[in-house]
Amino acid sequence: MAQVEVNNVTVSQGVRMLFSLMTPNESSFATVQEVPKYVNQATPYFFGLILLEIVLGWLKTDGPRIKLNDFITSLSAGMMSRLPQLVMRSLELSAYIYVWNNFRLLELPWDSAWTWWLAFLGVDMGYYWFHRFAHELNILWAAHQVHHSSEYYNLSTALRQSVTQQFSSWAFYLPLALMVPPSVFVVHIQFNLLYQFWIHTELVKDLGPLEWILNTPSHHRVHHGRNPYCIDKNYAGILIIWDRMFGTFAPESDKVVYGLTHPISTFEIWTVEFLYYPYLWQRFWKAEGISNKLSVIFKGPGWTPGKPRLGDIADIPQITGEEMPHDPTWSPAMQAYVLVQFLLLLDVYNNLLKDQTILSEMTALLLTAYVLLSLTSLGFLIDQRANAAEMEMLRCVLIMALQQFGYIKPLVPLLAFPIEAFVLISAVYWSLQCVNQRINRMKKQN
């Protein structure tokens, strides 16, 4: 019987990719160029599982809560985090190849199962230490806090990634480059990332004996909690044994309240991604003496003068279990509008990543600017900011220009006219909103 394929991958392979169940025989390659882009291939499975989680959440009275504003913000962060790939190769891979080419001590065979399993363990342990440092060094936390900023815990949360985190994670994998071929490393850095997708859910409660060995949804829920018992715990990627070995393990007990200890209360993507850096700079500037200034950067986020390196757990706001996530009211009509616009943007974004090798630099730059403007404008609409109408009007005008000159084409050609009509109507609507706002401002001034 022929197997169903999605994105040139059989359903069986797609599922096994997500759970790190691929075998050495089917995932060993001589060169980096031969290694499939597993993360790209897994994208349909991401959205399939997210849809399944939403449906099951609706069916279960105690199912996971998924809010459109939080959902779009998480996907927006994931989209933004991948845009640097348009202009440069992965820093993790570039640094790894450089060390391999210039400093390797021995060359393990790329087609050996022993090499494959060594890389599996090495990448997972490297991730543990990177992840731990990302929580214990304030300068690295500035990037990683993006992933923890959601006050919900569902599969879309896994996609809420930082733009800047990739500029620090590379260093933790370099010891492997002294012996493990880059092609083997590239396979496992992708598998390690893919595995961490499915553990971001409240639907899976307990996996029995597997809880002793693997990082599970239960263990990772603890990691995302802001309860005192959850802070700086369970850093694992795939294997929870590292936390058990190095003293950072905590089992799930009290109800977990998710998010940052001091929630950011916004859905605007630039704020989500970069808010912590000005805060860090402000703390650095106000600190007295070079020792305290360096401590602000290289000690934990909770550190203050006279406190332990990682801060005092007693300073963390108390959890009552009654905390409610930031979820301002917005009309169903606006929710529908933002969702449709986001889906149209997602199509442009996927085509941009897929066609990046054949697009001219100017086209890629123009579409990247459009994606960033769109993510910003939709975030402004969700946050209900005063200047959201002006920005959305400009964005709709830009969409019409891109459509007119052929830079944006719909996934289904038959939808071209309805989409163009929708964008035109949107542009007119937001133009009228801008005029109305100006009139109201003038009335208030008079």
Image (cartoon, helix red, strand yellow):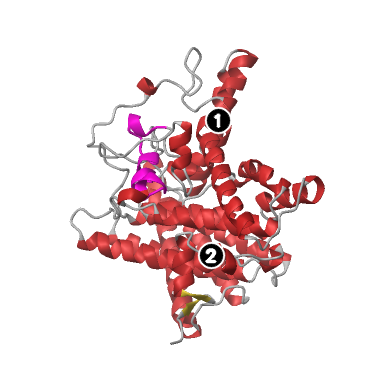
Where are the magenta residues, as a range?
A: 211-231
- Estimate the x, y position of residue 174 in percent, counting from the top left: 68, 44
Query: Mark 2 highlights which residue?
Result: 23
Q: Which residue is pictured at 62% across the width and 15% down the height?
A: 291
- Estimate the x, y position of residue 342 in percent, counting from the top left: 44, 63
Residue 225 is a magenta residue: yes
Q: Quadrant of residue 72?
A: bottom left
Q: In this view, does 105 lie above or below 228?
A: below
Residue 344 shows in the view: no
Looking at this view, is 257 or 271 the one in front? 257
Query: Mark 1 highlights which residue?
Result: 137
Q: In which quarter of the image is residue 261?
A: top left
Q: Is mark 2 on a helix, strand or loop?
A: loop
Q: Is mark 1 on a helix, strand or loop?
A: loop
Check disc 1 and give the amino acid type.
Leu
Check disc 2 and give the amino acid type.
Thr
Q: Distance between the residues labelled 2 and 1?
A: 36 Å
Q: In this view, does 36 lie above or below 102?
A: below
Give the left or right position of residue 298, taking residue 68 as reference: right
